[in-house]
Amino acid sequence: MKLKKGFVIRVVGGESVVVPVGELSKTFHGMINLNETGAFLWKFYNEEHTVEEGVAALCGEYDVAPEQAEADVRKFVETLQANGFTE
């Protein structure tokens, strides 16, 4: 899985937000607020990775049980896919 091009992540007022740019800004009107782990995963999935690789990366970055990391990554990926944010 990989994120669709046309979104950039920025830190605004200490918060990570994702906004559309270019052509995508004509159809997506808004921004996405991410917590710390969401921002980590968003950056991670700017390149092609599997869910399993996301779980390993999350476990390597944070003190989280593998089972919780897998549930979190799957939910994150499902939300991205359901909203058309992936290629």
Image (spheres, rainbow, N blue to C red):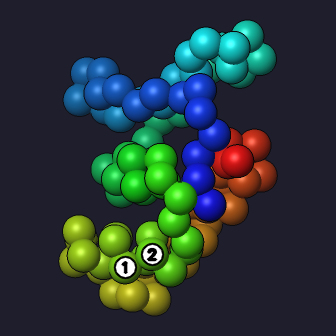
State whether residue 34 appears in this view: yes
The picture quadrant where one finds residue 71 is: bottom right
Q: Position of residue 10 (x, y in %)?
A: 35, 26
SS category of the residue bearing label 2: helix
Q: CA distance from mark 1 to mark 2?
A: 5 Å
The residue that appears at 53% across and 59% down in the rendered structure is 48
Q: Position of residue 83 (x, y in %)?
A: 75, 44
Residue at the spot of label 2: 53
In front of the other: 32 or 6: 6
Mark 1–mark 2 CB contact (< 8 Å)? yes
Disc 2 packing (10 Å; few <14; some 14–19; many ≥20): some
The amino acid type of the residue labelled 1 equals Ala
The amino acid type of the residue labelled 2 equals Glu
Q: Position of residue 47 (x, y in %)?
A: 47, 53
* Residue 56: mark: 1
- Judged left or right of residue 81, residue 14 is left
State whether residue 38 appears in this view: no
In front of the other: 54 or 70: 54
SS category of the residue bearing label 1: helix
- Judged left or right of residue 57, residue 38 is right
Above or below, 41 relative to 13: below
- Judged left or right of residue 82, residue 64 is left
